[in-house]
Amino acid sequence: MTLRSHTIIFAALAACTLAAAPAMAPAEEGGMIRIPDLTAVDETAPASGNIDVVAGEMDLPSAAAARMQFHRPANGPVPVAVEAREPILSPLLSPMPILPGQTRLRLQGEFPEAEFTLFLPQGTPRGQLVLDHESGVDVLPDRSSMEVFVNDVSVGTFPLGKSSGDAPDSLAVPSNVWLPGANRVRIALSQVHRIYCGPEAAFDLWTDLDLATSGALIDERPMISGSADFVAAVASDAVAGRAIELRDPGGIAEGVAATLDIAAYRLGRMVGGHTLRYAESSGWPVVAAPAEDDAPASAEDTTDEVEAAPEGPSHARITLIHRGALAIDDGRPDMEFRRAGDGAEVLVLRLDPQSSNQHVDAALGVAFDELMAHAREEAPGLSPTSGLSVGAGTLMRPGGPVRLSDLGMQTIRTSSHYFHRSQVFTLPRDWLILTAQKAVLHLDYAYARKLPNEAKLLIKVNGETVRLLPLVDEGGVLIEQFPVKFAANLLREGPNLLQFEALIPGAPSDFACPENAFPKLEIRGSTTLAVPASPRMRVPDLRGATAALRAGNLDLASSGAADLSMADRLSLVTALGMPSEGAAHLTVLSADALPRLPMGDYSFSPLALRDVLTKSPIVELPPPAYDARIGEVPDDSPFIGPVAGSEPPRTARLAGLFGQAVGTVAANVAAVQARLLPDADADADAWLDAQRGQAILLQLDVARPDRLWLVLGPRTDFAHVAARLAAGRRSIAGPNGQMAVLGHDDTWRSWADSRRMPELRERLTLANFRQVAGNYASWRPLYFTAALFGVALVFAALALRLVVLTRRPD
């Protein structure tokens, strides 16, 4: 026989031998490996039949496989536990900061819009777009609708008016509209009030969109995984609140922390405003062998010989393999995307804890950058901004006019009776103006003819109204470069907020709005904003320090918790950014460790801080009804004239007038004293007495403004506070001053020490002397006045001495 015939016969004998052999199980006593499958088990198959494993490798590290020893069970094959996995819902990702557990986004008003990013697997995805929404009772269903755009293509319209418990809407999106990787989804609502029309009615119109149950339902995926598949799974876990599994059977995570930081940071930027969480597992779940032959393992038999996976089956997983541990790893890529046997999308990283792994770091950057770059080429304007997102596009250079379109605000045309649009712009961290200099907004706008006389446009800066423009008389005409001046000292370094708010009454207001809605107001992107330049100065406070806070510079020794696990570290990298040199230092304390808090420049009692964290929240109760006030006459009493017995005697009236005058004088003296000699400790005590919260952030040492202290309440999770810190530093509502309390409503409330002096961060020259002196004079006007008065006295004394010396005797 030929060599080929020998080969065929040998292969046939080997196949017969393998077919007759029983299934293999691990050698450990009573244990077996759980081998999940992408598809559900066919219940019609014979019980003793073989189970086909889908084409797709499990993310089983070779080193772990080599350590496993198998034995042959005594009686028959061992049943294999198979887990079916539901189709993945790739969710809508909002650019707004969203905390874990928050899944509902409210769209309020007559014509609200929202933009999202949605990641799909590679190839030609097929599936439905599911939208789970609920509207308020004031929304008129017959005339209210939702239109959906995918990559700027309208794909369908839904009626509004669903209530809680109703089934979500779904529509089939043409396959040529979807893109592999990132897609842009825009939702535009048209909401009409059942009864009224106008700004007040618009406040009552709302629709909630559940981001956790809305998105693209992926029921078919390509056999070969890629970066788009992995990011889609990460997005699904982020919105659903599931932790991404970090599987590290070789225990090398600590040695490759720098590479994991890069991966976590990149993924955090891909999922918009959502916060990613991670959970560690050291291996593969092992379940106990059945007590009887052919009896499947039950839930009670499950053991934790290897650490179990995090809560719920995560759709995304990062698996670490020690590169070079075994010869079979040679020739495999050090970074690859794979689909595991249980259907999870896996980023496999083969790393060496003894080397820098820079080539893997570069490969991670290229994979995710190419994913976003390809999507932007196919769908321009992919990165959605609500006007509240802080990013590179919102940076503004002072000293000259900047178009709003360059900051992310394009031309806006609205038909709403109530319109509100906010736009963030970010000034340099060393920008400071305390003087009366003016910033100028040159507004290009137009409004419709014959609007009601009460129609008006409010322009606000950081929440303060700087101009009210009536929308009358000049309707139908474009008004160009209308100057709106406002005080530059309303602005601060970092994020600032420019707001447009229009209120247009309904005509009539006591009926539902007419169907022929027409554009009422247009604000053009050619509008310019000019902010004066300033010398490089800043007042040290929490705002700048939290902006420089990173995940790697934390001290948790006194927080009551153990050292950060790798999963916690990656969660913090997502929230705060990658570790870097020069970052601010944060020390975390528990309330019990307050005696170890160095008070720095302050001497108020740390017990005041403890009371803020331990006392019950202050609940504002409505005033009691007049019937409940025994013996008290209400202010709006129907009695005419003085009530009997209410007229005080003449002496008491005189004493009251004298006491009132004395009190007024004392208050004025106290105000002057507070300006000249401020008592920061008394002010801090008084402010803390009115606060209740779950955490306190402090900047106590003026000599070390980059050193921060965070005191946690008894039941406060540090990861939650870190997420609120990350969200706060991207808005004007973040912590500032020297103390900030995170309230029970997750809002920061801040206190500033008026003694903190501005710092000059450049050389004092003749060119900047005037502005520098003006900032110091505005910081302490009384000090500046006293200094000028002292200088005047010195020169007056010199002049008088000169007159005396030059006087001639008669």
Image: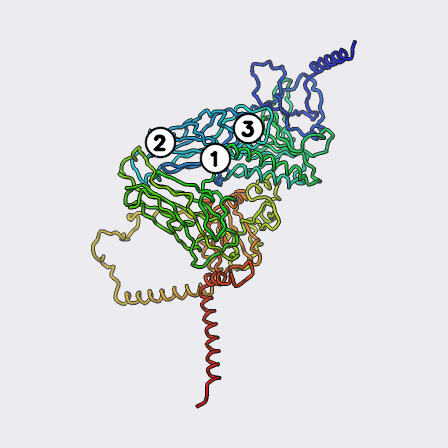
Residue type at mark 1: give it. Phe
Circle 3 residue: 121
Q: Residue at x 46, y 63 (%)?
A: 777
Label 1: few (<14), some (14–19) or many (≥20) C-alpha neighbours in 10 Å:
many
Q: Which of the two discs, 2 and 1, labels the residue nearer the N terminus?
A: 1
Q: Which mark is residue 709?
A: none
- The reply to whether callout 2 and callout 1 are in contact (CB within 8 Å) is no
Local packing at callout 2 (Cα closer than 10 Å; few below 14, some 14-19, many 20+) is some
Q: Position of residue 779 (x, y in %)?
A: 47, 61
In this rendering, position of residue 325 left or right of residue 638: right
Q: Secondary structure at mark 2?
A: loop
**562 relative to 405 in the view: left or right:** right
- Single out the residue that lies furthest toward the left: 640
Residue hosting label 2: 144
478 vs 170, left or right, is: left
* Crowd band around label 3 with a 10 angstrom C-alpha radius: few (<14), some (14–19), many (20+): many
Secondary structure beneath dot 1 equals strand
Residue type at mark 2: give it: Ser
> Which residue is rendered at x = 47% and y = 44% of the image?
406
Q: Which residue is mark 1?
A: 116
Q: Do tag 2 and tag 3 residues touch (Cβ < 8 Å)?
A: no
Provide the secondary structure element on which disc 3 rests: loop
Tell me if residue 562 comes above or below residue 487 in the rendering.
above
